Amino acid sequence: MSESRVRPRPTVAQIFLTYLKIGLVGFGGVNAWARRVLVEERRWVTEQEYAEVLGLGQVLPGPNALNVAIQLGERFRGGWGALAASFGLFGGPLALLVGLAMFHDTYGEVPLVKAVLAGTAAAAAGMILGTAAKITTKLKPALPILAVGIAALVGGSLLRLPLPFIVLGLAPFGILAAWWTRNRA
């Protein structure tokens, strides 16, 4: 029996409620929480499947967390699953965001509020780096695949290249690295 048959197939309501939790708990760091909930807690997808869907979600236009939610919702329950994941992911945070925007309009220039926002931005950056490190260590990518990832990191962070240049420039190398790695296994 394949692993995909062993894993549960969530209902539309379960997809909605799970993504509502992800959206509310992962406010500012949704992909970190989504990975934890979907891979570790619910076991709806494997680490590899999540990494693949996240990779595709990051190169598509729009928010990558939404792209992942739509892909997984559709995979589990078709169009209704995609809608449930989308509304769950953004419904709760949208309500919070409206409240925070009104708060910021009133108190945004207060030094304590500015300090809290700066600290929150640093924490969000740390969550992104932590998620990337966790995925990398769990997947243990082969050296050629890791080299493509490091090249993307250097291109984006040090050279400040636009994402389309990085994706288009490294895609052939990523495909070649994946092909080479699979053929050696």
Image: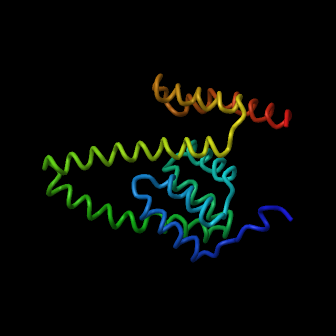
Q: How is the image coloured?
A: rainbow
41 up-or-down from 35: above or below: below
The quarter of the picture where the N terminus appears is bottom right
> Which quadrant of the view contains residue 36?
bottom right
On the picture, is 26 further left or further right than 42?
left
- Closer to the camera, 40 or 149? 40
Q: Position of residue 72 (x, y in %)?
A: 63, 60
- Closer to the camera, 119 or 165? 119
Q: Position of residue 121 (x, y in %)?
A: 33, 45
Q: Position of residue 73 (x, y in %)?
A: 61, 64
Q: Position of residue 143 (x, y in %)?
A: 70, 29
111 up-or-down from 163: above or below: below
- Closer to the camera, 51 or 135? 135
Q: Residue at x 18, y 56 (%)?
A: 105
1 up-or-down from 116: above or below: below
Q: Residue at x 46, y 24 (%)?
A: 158
Figure label count: 0
66 up-or-down from 123: above or below: below
Q: Residue at x 63, y 68 (%)?
A: 79
As drawn, the residue found furthest toward the top would be 159
Q: Residue at x 52, y 66 (%)?
A: 19
On the picture, is 79 further left or further right than 19?
right
